[in-house]
Image: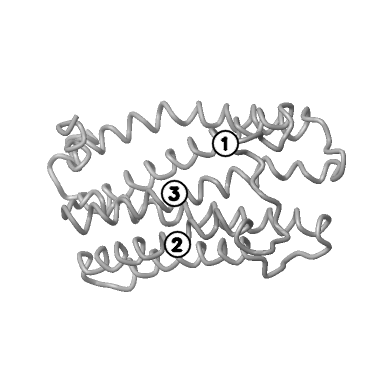
Amino acid sequence: MWAFIHKFGSPPWFFRFASTAVRWLLPVVIGALVFGAVWGLLYAPPDFRQGNSYRIIFIHVPSAVVALAGYYVMASAGLVSLVWKIKMADTAMRAVAPVGAALTFVALVTGAIWGKPTWGAWWVWDARITSMLILFFLYLGVIALFEAYDNKAAAAKACAVLSLVGTVNIPIIYKSVDWWYSLHQPASIKFTGETAIDASMLYPLLVMIAAFYGLFALLVLVNMRTELLATYRQSAWLRSELG
């Protein structure tokens, strides 16, 4: 197992792995997104209180869930970079940040669209919404730090520290609706206790969450492959891979 994990630190091996994985993931992710979107947006029943306006949940919740998980991926890469000095971890951090920022932005925008008919306002300084905005700025901070340093090793170290410090915001996002008065509804999907969403809405939502995880993996792999192309463009192994 450790030998397999060690392979991920090898740029030539990871470049081959990413190229193969992208080819397999692309049709699966597109198919899952189309299937889940059609199921949720067209065939799931309307909500008895919100009518059809709730259907944005099939975009809002998956983007928010994966944005949070993506931050843990970035922070884990930062930890690996700080402790074991593995360069591929730096590449992973840099690849995850724009994808996570985009997903967080989608979650914020779709939340605002959903909030207008539900709360009567595009934006409120709700605990969960505010902590999600902080998450967006954390992702942007990592992107900015990578661009701010000419010394890439110093940039990676600064980004790793910021990523790890920012993890304190993730449990705040999860628990904000429990800790403070919040307009934001509690979690509809629960690992313990009864799920507060009907099966006819739950199943397409789960499909969309899985599809967004696949989309996240696909985009991160594409970004990492692009980073490797830029970093090792003069290397013999890359010229050999590209034929």
Left or right side of 140 for 229: left
Quadrant of the image occupied by residue 47: top right
Q: Badge 1 local density, few (<14 within 10 Å), some, or many (20+)?
A: few
User: N-terminal of the two: label 2 or label 1?
Assistant: 2
State if disc 1 and disc 2 touch (CB < 8 Å): no
Q: Label 2 to label 3, Cα distance in Å?
A: 10 Å
Coordinates of residue 105 in the picture (x, y in percent) = 58, 58
Q: Quadrant of the C terminus?
A: top left
The label shown at residue 192 is: 1
Residue in the picture at 74% in, 56% down: 113
Residue in the picture at 21% in, 70% down: 151
Badge 2 is on which residue? 139
Q: Of helix, strand and loop, which one carries label 2?
A: helix
User: N-terminal of the two: label 1 or label 3?
Assistant: 3
133 shown above or below 8: below
Quadrant of the image occupied by residue 205: top right
